Amino acid sequence: MLRKHVKVEPARLYYWCDKLGLLVWQDMPNGDKHIRGNESDLKRSEESATQFELELTRVVNAFRNHPCIVMWVPFNEGWGQYDTGRIVNFIKELDPTRLVNNTSGWADRGVGDVHDIHRYPGPAAPPTEENRAAVLGEFGGLGLPVKGHTWRDEKSWSYRGYKTREELTDAYLVLLDNLRSLIGGGLCAGVYTQTTDVEIEINGLMTYDRAMIKMDVEKAAAANRRLYLPPPITKTIVPTSQKQGQSWRYTTSKPRIGWYRTGFLDSAWQEGKGGFGTEGTPGVVVGTEWKNSDIWLRRTFELKSKALSRPQLLIHHDEDAEVYINGRLIAKLDGYTSSYIRAGLDEKAQKALRVGSNCLAVHCTQTTGGQYIDVGLVDVIEQSDK
């Protein structure tokens, strides 16, 4: 599936999509002012609204006979968004055969056929509903500059940058594995950003000149094929604070050496409910406010058996985080996430787990913008392994 974002292509693209069986979500190019996700719809001038609806009508009528188009998208991220409910009905009257996405990202109005969110790098899923599909209209944005194949040599941009083809491919595989875990919870679609590099953005699967595919094609294709297998079952080992605040010992003053080890005495640390951070940080549920640069966390958990299928961290970190189990560093995660993601435990990390009491310790560093940390452990079980 292809989401044709805020652009209408020549008929040749839709012809080939028809021939190849490639589904298309077609955006309406947006204009006028911009609203944020928590703001009301625009009050467009009569002239502006009339022109938008004229051009919208022309787009639908020009391309409605291409069977590849399965959904119309009138607004993206609040650009020119106005009279959302009326515009959805307007499109439905023009073309009652297609789905309508009331807005891709941000300012959902509870109408149309899907609830569409954007999350970078993600992935994430909106709440499930009875009458609308839950979709992730944009995620990813993993970048790799390739010298000699970019629009400009310096200061190109991506949501998350990598230095080698191997690093980029590995990050993409992790991203799709996290996406797959959301399917079992009701996620119906995900749209990766993006097909090619564009002028200042280097987050494409291909370079700006289309000369190179930047990832390992076979590995990427295999990861995508796995999305169509039955989704895995996720069993909680250590709960996060997404649904209910979990108790942690914590300090915001640099602790003594060995703070992450099992025998460390943390009785002088404060006790609080996760997650830890500041309100307004994307995708967070704050149980205890944390506003300074660093926080150290500890908690214990019981493990009845080490016979686990695929144990993983479930973590939301903003920004850099280090995670320890029983004194062993099992994960070092740079940058930030805007939702909970899963991070696999390698063989050494799994060996750190033991039957009985275990210690989970975390250090998170804040550098800029929002801040948050919450960590849990899950076991991911393939349905074919049950």
Image (spheres, rainbow, N blue to C red):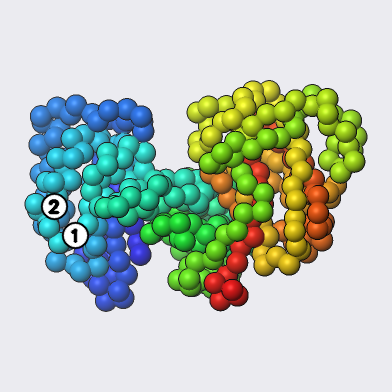
Which residue is at 21% across, 34% downward?
A: 82
Which secondary structure, mark 1?
loop
Which residue is at 54% across, 72% downward?
A: 383
Front one among 336 and 379: 379
Cα separation between marks 1 and 2: 7 Å
Horizontal and vertical percent for residue 146? Answer: 58, 56
Any part of residue 158 in sight: no
Q: Which residue is mark 2?
A: 92
- Residue 8, compared with residue 41, is above or below; it is below
- On the picture, is 61 further left or further right than 80? left
- On the picture, is 230 further left or further right than 257? left
Q: Which residue is mark 1?
A: 98
Any part of residue 326 in sight: yes
On residue 289, the disc is: none
Front one among 248 and 304: 304
- On the picture, is 255 further left or further right than 67? right
Q: Quadrant of the C terminus?
A: bottom right
Horizontal and vertical percent for residue 37? Answer: 36, 33
Amino acid on which disc 2 is placed: Lys
Which secondary structure, mark 2?
helix
- Residue 27, compared with residue 38, is above or below; it is below
Residue 354 position by quadrant: bottom right
Which residue is at 50% across, 28% downward?
A: 280
Horizontal and vertical percent for residue 223? Answer: 54, 69
